Image (spheres, rainbow, N blue to C red):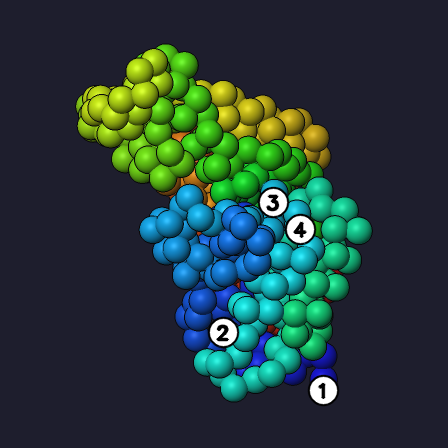
Amino acid sequence: MNFFDFSQRDIAIDLGTSNILVISKDSGIILKEPSILALNQKNMSIVATGKKAQDLLDKTPDTLKMIRPFRDGVIADYKYTLYLLKDVIKKAGKQFSFRKPRVLVGVPVKVTEIECMAIEEVLIQAGASEVLIIYEPVASAIGLGLDVLKPEGNAILDIGGGRTQFGVVSLGSVVSGSAIKVGGNYFNQKIIEYLKRRLNFGINISVAEDLKIDLGCATPLVAELITQIRGIDTATGVPKNITVTSKDIKRAMEKPLELIMESVIYALSNTPPELLSDILKNGIHIVGGGALIRNIDNLVFDVTGIKTYIADEPFDTVILGMQKIINNLEMYKDILM
């Protein structure tokens, strides 16, 4: 088969720490599930993957253990990654009656050659006939409708579940960038720690996630948000309700946000002057789930002095960019890794 003849059997996969997305050439997103497996606590056998695993973990958390096989955009556990990807490719194949799809996959900036080889190997073992690789900031820029082939700088800030990456894209490559192990999961962890330390109150990860979504903000809000939550008084062990405000959650999220801003400044300081002038003109584009944190664009502007834009579909920007690539591979063939 001609390398550039992408057909119905070709798909793109976004391997996120929190979620895995699959898209085909002509359809919308055909699969979107949590990037997790549920294991039996007694014998460590795999019980379910994806959404089924999440449903089981929500209902019977004491008898099951959750495994996230991807961490910070790369493989954390090969065996469980292989199992999950076999299931993902099988589910995608059922919709299009193909057995061995060709797969385009995104990888974060600062990924090593060994990590890339591991991703390619596990996808082949999981059922892919061939694997093509693209840097995620490049795919995001394409998903945003930017012309990545021009000799012009565009800046992408991707705040995902397990990591944050910043990439300056020009001529189809990442000219400068940074990647840190700070993302939505770390925000949740800090919210749990803050409530325990400051209010002697214990909550689980799902409550922390809800607080991040409902009250989280990067800069002070004009109108303070308030909610009531149920948890455990850590001093007595007794369940109780407390009131939590957006000010509380902002304080809890300060350290992760500080680390993200430091990574942005680091990448910008290593950007060639001619591309930095482009970024001053074009702005910084924020994608990933963290783009939905209230006032995150204001914080980035306050720190950098550069106008900032939130993607219309921040969760799906990478995968939509990869769909454009598999639809126009002749145009983008030279920017694949």
Alpha-carbon distance for marks 1 and 2? 24 Å
Amino acid on which disc 4 is placed: Asp
Mark 1 neighbour density, 10 Å: few (under 14) some (14–19) many (20 or more): few
Q: Are marks 1 and 3 in contact (CB under 8 Å)?
A: no
Alpha-carbon distance for marks 2 and 3? 23 Å
Residue at the (72%, 87%) spot, across then down: 1
Residue beneath disc 3? 71
Sequence-wise, which precedes: disc 4 or disc 3?
A: 3
Q: Identify the secondary structure beneath mark 3.
A: strand
Q: Nearer the viewer, residue 280 or 84?
A: 84
Question: In the drawing, does residue 68 fall left or right of residue 189?
Answer: right
Q: Which mark is residue 77?
A: 4
The answer to whether 258 is drawn above or below residue 288 in the figure is above
Judge whether residue 35 can be spotted in this image. no
Residue beneath disc 2? 91
Alpha-carbon distance for marks 1 and 3? 34 Å
Q: Nearer the viewer, mark 1 or mark 2?
A: 2
